[in-house]
Every structure is written in structure tokens, then in C-alpha cells.
Amino acid sequence: MDSAVWAVMGGLLLLAEFGFPEFILVFFGLGALLNALVIALSPHLQGAYHLQIILWAATSCLSLLALRRYLSAWFCGAPGEPQPGPFEEDLGATAETIEPISPEHPGRIRFRGTSWQAISAGEAIPRGTTVTILGRDNVTYLVTPEEEHEPTLKEQDPHSSAEGGGDHPPN
């Protein structure tokens, strides 16, 4: 095989790593690129396809075994290190309860325009309370009442109990 074929194959394997991010294909891509360089510099390997394949397999496997642990930690973080999740930016954000919430009985909050299940970190929280997000387990947020709670319009409106909310008894 020509060195250009190995170079193209190496580039395709490196691109494939983006679709299969196990950090393995990159070593086979680098092995193919190294093979292209060796074949370009060694004309006697031009027709020796079996030697080219052996060289590619050997360099790919050896680099995989020798370097994956170190490069994986460098590119992907060390194993066991907590990786930031997509919800970590939600920590400390505020939301509004749309159903009462307690530690024993989950309720619902409105956060970023969507209704989410939530559970209280300690005390019962009435509807309409502004809460602070402490964490998340799958699709359930852990919340606590905000320190300085200002009542929302729903809490101040005595007619909101007809809709099933508020702390006022029904008329």
C-alpha cells in the first residue's frame, strides 16, 4: 500500500474517535500515520504489504498499551475524579415550587420554564416558595427554601386557593 493510503486511513481513524470516544481508535490512527511515514522513508517497504500490516498492528497495539492510561488521564481526566455534569451550573440557582414539597413526599418546581420533580432537603416547603437548588439525582432536584423568602403573587392572592394552591382555606 502506498503511504498516502495509510495517511488517509490514519486520518479517518482519528476522525472516527469523535464518534466512538473510548480513546482507542486514536492509537490505531496514530499507528497508521506512523506507518505512512515509515513507508515514505523506506522504499523497500512499498510492496511488502504483510510487513506494513504487521508494523501497523505492532505500533498501534504497543502505543495503546503503553500510552492509553497516561494520555486518557490527560485528555479525559483521571479515573475516579468527579467529572462536571451538565447540571452543575444549576447548583445554587433558584426556582419556584408549583406543588408543596417535603422530605417524604416529592413535589414539583418550575425551573428554566420547565416543571421538575423536587424533594426538600429538610423542611416542608409550600407552593409558591422560592427555593435554592442543592443537587440533583437523575430528574429529581434537591431543594431548600431560599433564605429571604418574598411571597409571590400566587401566595398573596386569596383567590388562588380556588385553583388548588395557596395556604388559604377554600371558601
Image (spheres, rainbow, N blue to C red):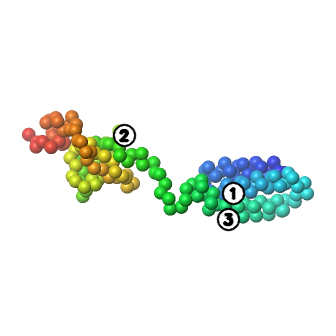
Residue 89 position in % (x across, y down): 42, 45
Amino acid bearing label 2: Arg
Amino acid bearing label 1: Phe
Q: Earlier in the sequence, mark 1 or mark 2?
A: 1
Residue positioned 47% across, 57% down in the render: 82
| Mark 2 residue element | loop
**How far is the residue under mark 1 from the one under mark 2?**
42 Å
Give the labeled residue for mark 3.
65
**How far is the residue under mark 3 from the one under mark 1?**
9 Å
| Mark 1 residue element | helix
Quadrant in the picture for residue 78: bottom right
Q: Residues within 10 Å of mark 1 (few under 14, many from 20)?
A: many
In-image side of 152 versus 138 (left or right):
left
Q: Is residue 141 visible?
A: no
Give the labeled residue for mark 2.
112
In-image side of 11 versus 46 (left or right):
left
Give the labeled residue for mark 1.
27
Q: Residues within 10 Å of mark 2 (few under 14, many from 20)?
A: few
Closest to the observer: 89 or 16? 89
Against 23, is 100 above or below? above
